[in-house]
Amino acid sequence: MCQFGAWGMKHRNSHLLVGYWGRLRRGRAVPDQSDVDPRAIKRMLSFVFLLDAADPDQTHYRLAGTSVCDRYGFELKGARFLAHWEAGSRPAIAGLLRQALALKQPVAISSFGNTPEGAVLEMETVLTPITLGGSTPTRFLGITQVLSDPSPLEGRPIAYQRLVGSQFIRENEPLANHTPPASPPGQRTLRSHPKAPHLRLVISRSKPLQANFDMDDAMRALVERLDIVPAPVASLVTTK
């Protein structure tokens, strides 16, 4: 299995998702899918997806945000997660999924994404294990972000990804300095783009649920499709 632990998480949204996952646990090893409230992660929801990993070798998408689907060029619901990865990376990715479920820990995966035209993008995927009404996690709430210049993706899908490194992460993992890994031989490197503004998750459990914004149709559909029970008030606050 490929395991390189020095690089750490780089995108702020990765930290936000892991922080949200940790808050949902409330003393448990992992949270349950019914605890997830899309309204609490509204600003990054289009990059979020849900995986069914009961069989890590056949892991598939249950749901995926619009930006994730656009990134690969098709609707991902029902598609195999390993299909994005080159053949040489698939056994290692399946092994990482198994280990994350067994350890009940999030895993961060660094990769290169290649477009059909040969452009190379640095990517980061974070997978946080969750249960589905039981004590053993069988699913992942995940997020995928492009760390380098996304302009080559305008109207073009990612054809495949190649695993570069991975790390099992702690909730207090510091934001790593963004030093892109070496580009594959013979392929051009893309410059890094600025990170998203820092967002702080604020949760109050002493008050009834209050939505701080109206849900659009896509948000409402996601809530309904996940059979989500309204959670205590949760909101994202932008900080400078």
Image (cartoon, helix red, strand yellow):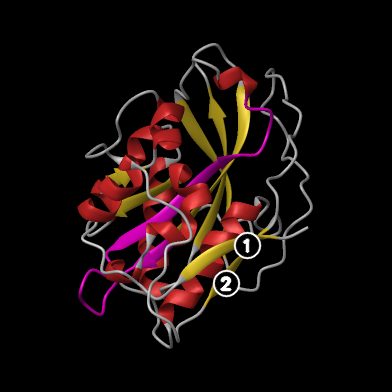
Residue drawn where x is 70% and y is 50% of the image: 197
Give the residue at mark 2: 202
Q: Amino acid at mark 2?
A: Val
Is mark 2 in CB contact (under 8 Å) with mark 1? yes
Q: Is residue 85 visible?
A: no
Q: Which mark is residue 237?
A: 1
Q: Choose between 38 and 57: the one closer to the eye.
A: 38
User: Is 32 situated left or right of 199 in this image?
Assistant: left
Q: Quadrant of the C terminus?
A: bottom right
In the rendered image of this protein, does residue 152 appear above or below residue 168? above
- Range of the magenta residues? 128-150
Q: Quadrant of residue 86?
A: top left
In terms of secondary structure, where does tag 2 sit?
Answer: strand
Q: Earlier in the sequence, mark 2 or mark 1?
A: 2
Q: Choose between 43 and 193: the one closer to the eye.
A: 43
In the rendered image of this protein, does residue 221 appear above or below residue 32? above
Q: Which mark is residue 218?
A: none
